[in-house]
Image: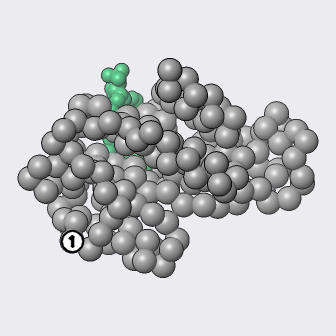
């Protein structure tokens, strides 16, 4: 089940033809990622970026997902109870942004919901123990903690959402 966007938008896997050079979400690192790096990383199969395109072909927003590993000791004890003491698989929400002209219209939340739905769907085939992300700044952190993301011990800008919490979110959004 995909996350609905208003009718003028379409969500697509990033392609060379998408107009990413003019993207401006107000955060330089995020702009730089989608303008200059996201496509290269996708071509190298390091990450996948999905872009939200409006009816005028503006790149309205995007998110990037990747896979990763996290050391057993970097996760909270309640999450790793009964797990093996080794590097553990995680899904990584690497980047998310909405064009600054469109902030405050609910697109960020829809993109985040869509990214988590993609993680959940992928997790039916490729298991992971949590979704993790690195906050680019305090504003991003305050945004993500509105959703059920929590700080990882000893790393206040790295947040996680356990796979079981993700599953509960997805189950409840079905009903
Ligand atoms: C963070 C970002 C994606 C939010 O996009 P958006 O489309 O404006 O978000 P929405 O309109 O869906 O906002 C949904 C809710 O989040 C709240 N919100 C938005 N930004 C917030 C922030 N920085 N801190 C706390 N809450 C925030 C909104 O007030 C809204 O709350 P409401 O539902 O109670 O009204 C956007 O501000 C952005 O692109 N920022 C720069 C890039 C960035 O920081 N990306 C994240 C790190 S990679």
Residue under numbered circle 1: 17
Q: Circle 1 — which element?
A: loop
When the figure is inspected, residue 36 is found, relative to residue 156, above or below; the finding is: below
Q: Position of residue 83 (x, y in %)?
A: 87, 47
Residue in the image at 40% along x and 52% along y: 63
When the figure is inspected, residue 116 is found, relative to residue 87, above or below; the finding is: above
Q: Is residue 60 left or right of residue 40?
A: left
How many labels sit on residues?
Answer: 1
Q: Is residue 104 left or right of residue 63?
A: left
Residue in the image at 79% along x and 38% along y: 79
**Label 1 within 8 A of ligand 1 by Cβ:** no
Q: Is residue 58 left or right of residue 26?
A: left
Q: Quadrant of the N terminus?
A: top left
Q: Position of residue 116 (x, y in %)?
A: 51, 42
When the figure is inspected, residue 156 is found, relative to residue 142, above or below; the finding is: below
**Quick one: 135 or 47, which is closer to the camera?**
47
Q: Quadrant of residue 9?
A: top left
Mark 1 Cα-neighbour bin, 10 Å: few <14, some 14–19, many ≥20: few
Q: Quadrant of residue 125?
A: bottom right
Task: Name the quadrant where ligand 1 sits.
Answer: top left
Residue in the image at 45% along x and 63% along y: 48
Residue in the image at 58% along x and 28% along y: 171
Q: Position of residue 111 (x, y in %)?
A: 37, 42
**Quick one: 164 or 60, which is closer to the camera?**
164
Q: Is residue 65 left or right of residue 6?
A: right
Question: Can residue 79 be seen?
Answer: yes
**Quick one: 59 or 118, which is closer to the camera?**
118
Q: Quadrant of residue 49?
A: bottom left
Q: How is the image coloured?
A: one colour
Q: Position of residue 23 (x, y in %)?
A: 22, 58
């Amino acid at each position: 089940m995909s996350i609905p966007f208003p009718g003028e938008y379409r969500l697509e896997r990033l392609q060379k033809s998408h107009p990413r050079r003019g993207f401006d979400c107000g955060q330089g690192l995020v702009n730089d990622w989608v303008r200059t790096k996201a496509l290269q990383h996708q071509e190298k199969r390091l990450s996948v970026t999905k872009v939200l395109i409006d009816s005028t072909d503006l790149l309205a927003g995007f998110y990037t997902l990747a896979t990763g590993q996290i050391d057993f000791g970097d996760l909270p004890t309640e999450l790793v109870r009964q797990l093996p003491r080794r590097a553990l698989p995680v899904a990584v929400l690497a980047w998310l942004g909405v064009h600054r002209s469109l902030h405050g219209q609910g697109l960020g939340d829809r993109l985040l919901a869509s990214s988590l739905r993609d993680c959940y769907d992928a997790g039916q085939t490729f298991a992971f123990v949590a979704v993790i992300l690195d906050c680019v700044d305090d504003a991003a952190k305050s945004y993500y903690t509105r959703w059920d993301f929590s700080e990882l011990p000893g790393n206040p800008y790295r947040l996680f959402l356990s796979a079981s919490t993700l599953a509960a979110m997805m189950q409840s959004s079905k009903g």
